[in-house]
Image (cartoon, helix red, strand yellow):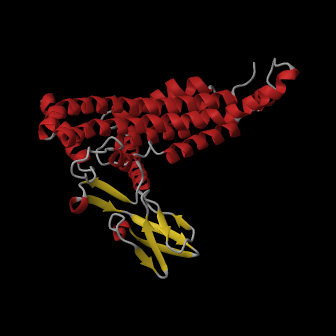
Amino acid sequence: MKKLFAVFFSLFMFTTYAGETTTQIEGELYNPVPTIMHHISDSHEWHLWGEGKNSVTIPLPVILYTNGNLDVFMSSKFKHGKAKVQKGNRIYSVDSHSHITEEGGNQVLDLSITKNVASMLLSLVVLIVLFGSAGRRAKNKKGAPTGILSIIEPLVLFVRDDIVAPNIGKKYEKYLPYLLTLFFFILINNLLGLVPGAANVTGNIAITLVLSFITLVVTNLSGNKSYWGHIFKPPGVPLALMPIMIPIEIVGVFTKPFALMIRLFANISAGHIIILSLISLIFMAESGLGTAGAFGVAPVSVLFVLFMYLIEVLVAFLQAYIFTLLTSLFIGLAVVEEH
C-alpha cells in the first residue's frame, strides 16, 4: 500500500510540474530556467498546470491606481501576458517579469491580489479553521485531546515550553501570541508551498523581509536600559575602542533580522528549485537523447524528487522552528535584566 501511494504521489507531482514546462525549440537542449523561475516567482494569475491553450489557471483581481484613477479587472483580460487592457485612456500591459506597466509612462501603484497574496489569504482561512475547531474542542475537552486538538495542542505547548519561555524568561507571556502566530503562519505556508501548483510564499524575499522587520521592531521596542547600554556603551570595552565597537553593535541590530530573512527565503526557494531541477532532467534527457534517454532518467529522477520532497517536509517544520527560536532569543536578549 505504501509503495502504491509513493508511485501515485510521484506521478501526480511529475504530471503537475511537467505541465509547467515552456515551449521548446526543435533541436535545442531543454532550458529549465524559465520554468523554474516562473514557478518560484509571484504572478497576477494562479497557474496550476498545462501550457498554452491547455493551460489551467485561476484569474486573480488586478487593482491598479494610476494618476488618481482606480482600475479593477481580472487578470484573465491579459490573456497570459499576450494582450493589453484599456481602461479609459490608460493602456496596461504585463512585462516579462510579470510587472504591470502603463504605456503613457505613468507611475502605477499595483494593489493586486497576486498569487502569493491569495495563498496567504488561503493560509489565513486554514489557520482560522484549524484553531477554531481546536478551540471548540479545548473548551469541551474531557480527558485526552482528540481530533485536530491532538495535533495543535502539542505544537502550542512545544512552542511555549521549549522555545518561548526558556529564551525570554518571566515576561514570555507578553510575546507568546505573536510568536505562536509567527510559528504557525510560517509552518502552514511552508506546507502549502509543497502542494504541486501552489505559491512560493515563504520563498518570496518580500514576505520574509516583512516578517524579519516585525521581529526587528518588536525586539527594539522591547529593549530595556541594559540592552541599549550594551549597544551604545559596551561594558568592559576601553574608551579608545568605543568608536569601533559602537558601530559594530549598531550594525548587529540589523544583521540579526537580516539573517532571519535570508535563511527562510533561501532554504524554501532552494527546495523548490532542486525539485524542479530534478524533474527537468527528464526533459533535458529527452531533448538531447530522445525518448529512450527520458525513460532512462525518469525513474532515478522521480525517486530523487520523492526523497527531496520528504526532506522539504522536514525543512518546513525546521524553518518555522528556527525562525521562532531566534526571534525568541533576540527578544529575550532585549528584555533580560542585568545581573
Judge from the rendering whether residue 135 lies leftward or rightward of residue 277; answer left or right: right
Observer-nearest of 193 and 38: 38
* Location of residue 47 with respect to 87 vertically, above or below: above
Which quadrant, please, contains the N terminus? top left
* Location of residue 226 with respect to 182 vertically, above or below: above
Does residue 6 appear in this view? no
Residue in the image at 46% along x and 45% along y: 204
Which quadrant, please, contains the C terminus? top right
* Outermost residue to the right: 239
* Outermost residue to the bottom: 88
Observer-nearest of 261 and 332: 261
Residue in the image at 33% along x and 63% along y: 80
- Residue 319 sits in quarter: top left
* Location of residue 115 with respect to 192 vertically, above or below: below
Give percent across and percent down for residue 264: 48, 36
Give percent across and percent down for residue 247: 76, 32
* Location of residue 166 with respect to 52 vertically, above or below: above
Does residue 107 appear in this view? yes
- Residue 281 sits in quarter: top left
Judge from the rendering whether residue 123 lies leftward or rightward of residue 172; answer left or right: left
Residue in the image at 58% along x and 75% along y: 67
Number of marks present in the image shown:
0
Residue in the image at 53% along x and 36% along y: 262
Give percent across and percent down for residue 123: 40, 48
Give percent across and percent down for residue 29: 26, 43
Judge from the rendering whether residue 9 lies leftward or rightward of residue 101; answer left or right: left
